[in-house]
Image (tube, helix red, strand yellow):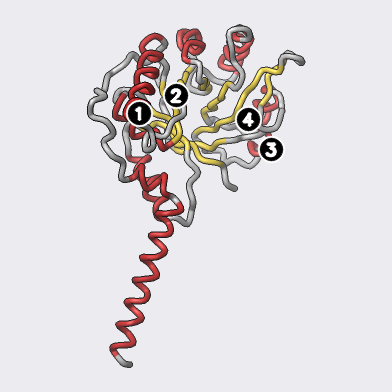
Amino acid sequence: MNTNIITNKYALSLFVILCLFLLDVALHSGMSRVIAHSSFYDRIAPINLPVCAHRIVAKDKNWASGITKLILQKLPVNIAGIQCDLYYDQEANIFRIANDRSTIDEFFEVYSSKKLSAAVWLTLKNINNQNLHFYFTELMRLKNKFGGSQKIMIESTAAELLRSFCDSGILTTYRVPVFDPYRATEYEIKKFADSVRSNLRAYPASAISADYLQYPALKKFFPNYPILTWVALSPVSVVSYVLRRQLEKDEHITVILTPFKE
């Protein structure tokens, strides 16, 4: 066979692979930025802040998000952790899973029937000062009924409302304000860092949670805080694979939340 033909085929193959890789990078530009993240602003000094005495111990970083009563039936028994949104239905005076409106007891009945041991991350969607007592009473009941301090973790954007749960042995994570550090100005990043620092100093949590884009900034500014993050990973993307491996190896990351796929 003509060596020129072989050489041309080899060069064409390399060109196609390079184009596919560049397309992958373009389609997953956010992930690419995180993989090759910048140092952000050196003028914002890292600081160690008080952490809730009750720490998250995850046997596996990979947890599933958006879980419903129906999806519970499909989960592998050995899954490490799951996440769902919880809200207080004031009219019915009951707690529901936002994803499918099942009651919290219906949800945990399926959990028990499946003999799951997964940690349950509950994002509190409408907690406020008016219904704080109802949330606290219900979550203490669930904690006592379904297996102690390492089974249930709650998340809220209101750091001050998490304090009573932390003091009572429930794992907590403070969901930090949303912002894109790659597009923010130095002033906006400093304002963000000061806000999170102020909240955690006054109301320590077990961890902080944020979109994966924010994780490099959180890791730098708050080095002693465990980070919980979420990302939609693609099974056919090299960039997505590299990001997953990076998150899995990073000691600052405690949980990686991804949508459940059958």
Horizontally, residue 258 falls left or right of residue 48, namely right
Rendering coords of residue 195 (x, y %): 39, 17
For label 3, count other residues whose C-alpha is less than 10 Å away and answer few (under 14), some (14-19) or many (20+). few
Q: What residue did someone put label 1 on?
A: 218
Query: In this rendering, would 131 be left or right of 228?
Result: right
Percent x, y of residue 117: 54, 30
Other residues around mark 4 within 10 Å, as few (<14) / some (14–19) / many (≥20): many
User: Looking at the image, which residue is at 76% across and 15% down?
Assistant: 91
Q: Are marks 1 and 2 in contact (CB under 8 Å)?
A: yes
Distance from Cα at disc 4 to Cα at disc 3: 11 Å
Residue kind at label 4, given as amino acid type: Tyr
The residue where tag 3 is placed is 70
Please state which of residues 158 and 115 is positioned toward the viewer in this rendering. Answer: 158
Disc 3 residue type (three-letter): Leu
Q: What's the mark number on residue 176?
A: 2
Q: Which residue is mark 4?
A: 111
